[in-house]
Amino acid sequence: MKSNAWIKVTLPIAVLAIGIGGMIAIKASAAKDEDKAAIDTRPTVKVENAVSQDYQVLIASFGEVKPLESTMLSAQVSGEVTGWNKNFVPGGLVLRGEVLFSIEKDAYEAAFLQAQAAVNSAEAQLIEEQARGRVAEQEAKNVAKNQLSDLYLRKPQLLSAQAALKSAQARLKIAQRDLDNCEVKAPYDALVVSRNIGLGQYLNQGVQVAEIHNIESAEITFPIAGFDNAFLPSGLAGTQATVKTKGFDAVTRDGIVTRDLGIVDKATRMSQLVIRVDDPYGIKTDLAPLKYGSYVEVNFAGRTLQQVYKLPQELVTNRTVWVVNKENKLEPRKVDIVREEGAYLLIGEGLRDEDKIVLTLPEYPQKGMEVKLSQPASNSNTEADVAVKSNVIEG
């Protein structure tokens, strides 16, 4: 009986203890399941710290290489062509002062000798009149003053002799010029474009015989768009520039911006600038020739922008850049785009140094969305770095 009573007392207590233990076990298991279910759903983004620096703008455009000057050569005297320079052919290069072709000289040499003889004769006449004048002055000492005159002192005869000498000297100068013009010389280092004469051909004075281009300097006129005008350097004349051709055998030469043409094209609303390149055909150097008619790209340094950021264009949408704030939440920033350069945009206002610029944006970004960083933000110098790097333009 006592045993049954003890069983009746302890059994409910044991059942209750087992139930409590089961409940505790169930709660512990549920807590573990809850811990397992707490998965981090925040999107992962890659960021880069923004660092503002000064940035020198690069102005780029295109233009055609043209000669600084062209000359249509004409003969200044008439006569038969007696010879011409072997380089005086289309495509030939001639140097300043080289004889391009010669005209028969006999008649002009004879005219020169006649003019020279006339000068000698006039000089002799002048000497004779000067002597007569001195004799008249001596005789005038014995003559009353009221009987003296300029004619008696031979002053008119002296003036006439002096005038005759000057006239003879002028004719000699013309004869010398005509004789010199029998040899037509290159006025500058030149490229021969065309030649219209042959050996034995008779030329009339003033007839066009050839066309040549100056190769001492070339010029490239190129347009500047309106949005580039604000970025031109303040001292434009004398700015160093680079001129490049395109293609497999590209040529790169240095030039100098010389001037603004001072007009705005009515059709395109663009300004026109001029770059000069010395010795384009490499006559005085070993540089590759920059041929006339070539279409080239020109580049030169513009203004230096202060404290700007350079971002790839894909990071800017509707003038908005996404950053991660201190709470690791996405935050859109409206930015001021100062200039577009190739695949990049230059940002003026809207960003601050050390802002974490989002490089890999979630598919549906929202303001205040919590994110986690794939790696700590750094100031790396990789190609995708959004921090502005100083870009010093040389040349």
Image (cartoon, rainbow, N blue to C red):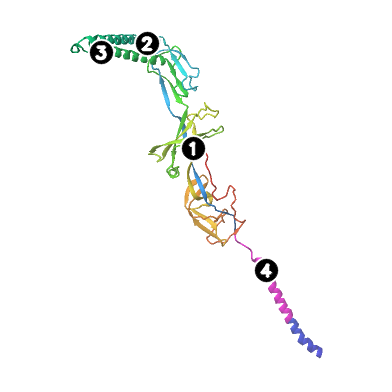
- State the predominant SS element of the stretch in magenta: helix
| In front of the other: 369 or 71 | 71
- The answer to whether marks 3 and 4 mark residues whose Cβ atoms lie closer than 8 Å is no
Instruction: State which quadrant residue 250 falls in.
Output: top right
| Label 3 to label 4: alpha-carbon separation | 138 Å
Instruction: State whether residue 226 is above or below residue 204.
Output: below
Mark 3–mark 1 Cα distance, whole angstroms, equals 67 Å
Task: Give the side of residue 191 with respect to residue 204, left or right.
Answer: right
Q: Label 4 is placed on what type of residue?
A: Asp
- What residue is shown at x 79% (from left), y 86% (from top)? 7
Taking the spot 77% from the left edge, 85% from the top edge, the residue there is: 10
**Residue 85 in picture, x, y percent from top left:** 48, 17
Q: Residues within 10 Å of mark 4 (few under 14, many from 20)?
A: few
Q: Which residue is mark 3?
A: 155
Label 4 with label 2: CB-CB less than 8 Å: no
Mark 4, residue position: 33
Secondary element under disc 2, as helix, strand or loop, is helix
Q: Pointer 1: residues within 10 angstroms few (<14), some, or many (20+)?
A: some
Is residue 77 visible from the viewing direction of this image?
no
